[in-house]
Amino acid sequence: MIGLNGGLIGAVKSPSQSSAIGVWTLNEQINIKRQGLWPVAGDPYFSNVSLLLHCDGTPIVDSSGSPKTVTAVGDAQISTVQKKFGTGSLLFDGNGDAATIPNTNNAFTFSTNTYTFECFIRPVALSSFKILLDASAAFTGFFGTLYLAHNGTTLVWGTRPNTGSQYAYVEGTGGTLTTNEWQHVALSVDSGAAKAFIDGVAVGSPITFSTPEFTPVGFGVGHFSNTFEAQYSFNGYIDEVRITNGVARYSSNFAAPTAPFPGQ
């Protein structure tokens, strides 16, 4: 906001520059910018973002700092009928659809056991176990996966290590999802301490994930990344997908995003 005499209101000032807190003269703005101290809009963790999908057009574009190819599987497509932000969202019909992204440069290898999965979803139907976001190893089904999913109206998050048994897993559940409404869902894992959120509110109980003992073949949106079985395919719209590797963005309740995820 521009104040009197060209001052900018709202930025934090250093007392050594002016006693008029929050009001910057144009010369002050120029000097601070030259020193590299002017606040920069954007994501402070952008360098950790492995995947950023705004879902606004075809082809589907990864807007992270290291763009990767996004492949639509089945009938997965950009739709302009529904969108949380921008001009479109990813539509999945619940019959084997997916968007897959390769694990280029280990973008989805979560070796520090600290990461964040998040997106906006608008389910058309909520029945049985369906994948929202997933990183899977080169095995079928549940072997070697990290996932954010839903089981009916309940949010589900879990990890199934490469043990040869789909029952050797840790999984949390909680919260209530609603059809035909946009909701922000997130899984935030800090050194194995996993918390899930719906619209910024923590759901279920915190659980502990073991360090992944597998290397994912890639990342899946709307389905597992390593297999295509219709029974696990999400039915609805997904928008604003962001995967952050090495940063647990959310440790407690927060305000759900009100704008597209920022870039650098």
Image (cartoon, grey):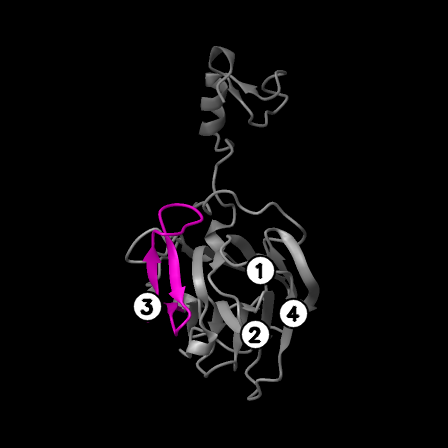
Residues 176 and 246: in front is 176
What amino acid type should be assigned to the residue bearing mark 2?
Answer: Pro
> What is the spatial separation of the Cα atoms under label 2 and label 3, in whole angstroms?
31 Å
Q: Are marks 4 and 1 in contact (CB under 8 Å)?
A: no
Mark 2 is surrounded, within 10 Å at the Cα level, by few (under 14), some (14 to 19) or many (20 or more) other residues, namely many
The residue identified by callout 3 is: 75
Q: Position of residue 78 (x, y in %)?
A: 33, 57
State left or right for residue 164 relative to residue 139. Answer: right
Q: Residue furthest left?
A: 59
Q: Which residues are magenta?
A: 73-102
Residue depth check, mark 2 versus mark 4: number of the one nearer the observer: 4
Q: Are marks 2 and 4 in contact (CB under 8 Å)?
A: no
Based on the displayed image, in which of its 4 quarters is residue 128 positioned?
A: bottom right
Q: Is residue 2 above or below residue 246?
A: above
Q: Which mark is residue 110?
A: none
> What is the spatial separation of the Cα atoms under label 1 and label 2, in whole angstroms?
28 Å
The residue identified by callout 2 is: 212
The residue identified by callout 1 is: 177
Q: Secondary structure at mark 4?
A: strand
- On the question of residue 16 being in view, the answer is yes
The residue identified by callout 4 is: 172
